Image (cartoon, helix red, strand yellow):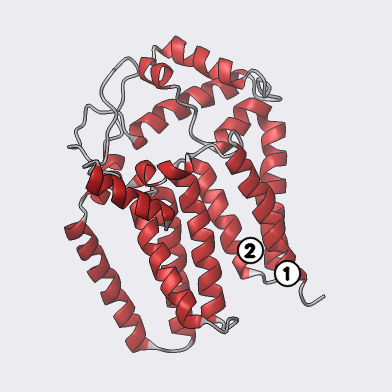
Amino acid sequence: MACLLYGIYNYTSNNQTDALYNDNFTSLLEQQSVYIALLINFAIFIIGYQVVYKRTTYPFILTVGGIFLLFITYLLGSRINIGVLAIVIVGFGFYYLISNKKLLEIATLCLGLIMAGVIIYKVQPQMLNRFKELTYNKYEYSHMGAESHYGMELTEDQWNGANFRLAAWRCGWEIFTENPVVGVGLGDKKDKLFSKYEQKDFRFAIETGKNVHSNYLDVLYGLGIIGFAIFVFTWVILPFMHAFKNKNWLAVVFIFTLACAWVTEIYFDRSLGGMVAGFFIPFILIAGKEKE
């Protein structure tokens, strides 16, 4: 709410037309929108769980809060988190309605999703640019084009979220293939990455200080195949197994959300990202021990 009010203030007083979108929306928190969007997803999942399974005495208030957070998620504009949220909501919606044989409600849900998409496109077409970027995936390392922005016209000669990641991921993969067993080490991984950027003449990434933009790839070339295997087993596979064993579906959704978020961003290089994983995974798994 504070970010929303601050954004409205910047929009009206300073004529900042993009004050209510993406990273500008979370400037008050001094955090990138992608990390806040992840936490918003967690909040929405908790609210949905409490309301659907009637574990709250205030369903109306929580429902209103959940709708407000859906609106905030849209403003944050994180593609990966919006995608995960849509998969979870639509998947659970169809499961719940089909299991309860509510065919009319299924048709209503489908119609509602189509209408929501049309309304979003008409009201704020900038979001379409965020996803349209994904179709512009060609790149040349030496190219010094501008970085695409949701408030500007999207063109093929820009660096965007798709072609930059493909370029950076290739650099990270090559570093891994040169040091496959134990990696380059945590202390040297940033220097090794920028040396690879230099080798590729990737001036855009050097001048903007870009990381490899994938938690998995960062661990892979930093710690090698051994460290990567330990990471995936302890932070993804083992928590999933524990959650499934205890039928802790909220924990399954949380871990799925984090596992997807780690594909396109580095979380463990930031204090907030490390705290989110280190706190929420053990915290949500505790719920499976309630019966015991």
Name the residue that disc number 1 marks. 288
Q: Along the horizontal axis of the image, is 62 left or right of 155?
A: right
Label 2 vs 1, first from the N-terminus:
2
- Residue visible at 56% across and 62% down in the picture: 253
* Quarter of the view holding residue 145: top left
* Quarter of the view holding residue 102: bottom left
Kind of residue indicated by mark 1: Gly
Q: CA distance from mark 2 to mark 1?
A: 8 Å
Q: Is residue 20 visible?
A: no
Asked if the residue under mark 1 is in contact with the one under mark 2, i.e. CB atoms within 8 Å, the reply is yes
Q: Along the horizontal axis of the image, is 259 left or right of 127?
A: right
Pick the quarter of the image with the N terminus. bottom left
Residue 141 in the image, given as x and y percentages of width and height: 35, 18
- Residue visible at 67% across and 31% down in the picture: 225
Residue 19 in the image, given as x and y percentages of width and height: 30, 45
- Residue visible at 67% across and 20% down in the picture: 187
Numbered label attached to residue 251: 2
- Assess disc 1: are there few (<14), some (14-19) or many (≥20) residues with their C-alpha within 10 Å of its C-alpha: some
Q: Against 103, is 218 above or below? A: above
Kind of residue indicated by mark 2: Ala
Residue 237 in the image, given as x and y percentages of width and height: 67, 52
Residue 77 in the image, given as x and y percentages of width and height: 35, 49
Query: Of residues 175 and 48, which is closer to you in this image?
Result: 48
Q: Against 24, is 291 above or below? A: below
* Quarter of the view holding residue 144: top left
